[in-house]
Image (cartoon, helix red, strand yellow):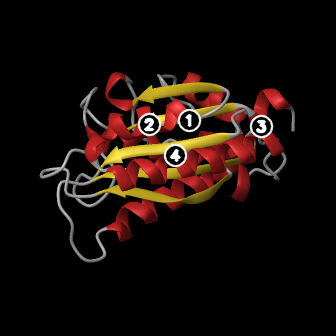
């Protein structure tokens, strides 16, 4: 894999708050990451949900032409992929979940139309989540959704980092979480410099 591929990180921010808790975690990660950063704020994107038209089973790409097009292009040669979101109803935010449904094209490459080449690069990635509270097993649904997204996008997950109880303590003030993020950035940088195995 070329160094140009290895050194690009795609980050999807699923928060409606430009300077909120999720953005604070993203800023901490970006400070430590090497290479090119492509940041997508889903609340600024016009994305339609997958309509299960089966276009991607027989054709390259997606039948819907919207703000997913530049995202698809960046994912093809990225070496890292980060999902960041507040927890809404136990999972990622609704616009981020809508984006996830449009990853059906990559599932189709893996499971249906093997005669059409898949341009997607292999990647490493992680999930960053912020939650207002904390309860037993609250990570199960959001981790599950993230793992589906990572599987569809050829992303080897390096784990999840949660900033809990942001209703009481701002994510930016949670020093242990910020330290975990810096450690995650080191792991991502190491993977980017070495190249991600397919």
Q: Which mark is residue 32?
A: 1
Q: Which mark is residue 119?
A: 3
- How would you rate the neighbour count of disc 3 (Cα within 10 Å): few for under 14, some for 14-19, many for 20 or more? some
Q: Are marks 2 and 1 in contact (CB under 8 Å)?
A: yes
* Left or right: 191, with 2 as reference point: left
The local secondary structure at tag 3 comes to: loop
The local secondary structure at tag 4 comes to: helix
* Left or right: 42, with 132 as reference point: right
Please say whether residue 21 is visible from this viewpoint: yes
Q: CA distance from mark 1 to mark 4?
A: 6 Å
Q: CA distance from mark 4 to mark 2?
A: 7 Å
Along the viewing direction, whichever of 110 and 82 lies nearer the viewer: 82
The residue to which callout 4 is attached is 182
Between disc 3 and disc 2, whose residue precedes? 2
Q: Are marks 1 and 4 in contact (CB under 8 Å)?
A: yes
The local secondary structure at tag 2 comes to: helix
Q: Is residue 105 above or below residue 157?
A: above
């Amino acid at each position: 894999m070329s160094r140009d591929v290895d050194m690009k990180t795609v980050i999807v921010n699923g928060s409606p708050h430009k300077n909120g808790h999720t953005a604070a975690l993203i800023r901490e990660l970006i400070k430590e990451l090497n290479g090119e950063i492509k940041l997508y704020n889903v609340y600024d994107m016009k994305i339609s949900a997958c309509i299960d038209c089966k276009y991607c089973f027989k054709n390259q790409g997606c039948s819907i032409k919207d703000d997913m097009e530049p995202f698809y292009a960046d994912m093809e040669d990225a070496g890292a992929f980060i999902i960041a979101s507040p927890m809404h109803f136990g999972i990622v935010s609704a616009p981020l979940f809508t984006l996830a449904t449009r990853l059906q094209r990559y599932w189709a490459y893996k499971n249906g139309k093997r005669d059409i080449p898949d341009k997607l690069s292999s990647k490493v990635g992680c999930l960053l989540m912020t939650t207002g509270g904390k309860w037993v097993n609250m990570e199960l649904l959001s981790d599950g959704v993230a793992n589906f997204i990572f599987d569809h996008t050829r992303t080897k997950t390096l784990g999840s980092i949660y900033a809990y109880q942001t209703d009481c303590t701002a994510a930016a003030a949670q020093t242990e979480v910020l330290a975990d993020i810096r450690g995650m950035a080191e792991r991502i940088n190491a993977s980017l410099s070495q190249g991600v195995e397919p």
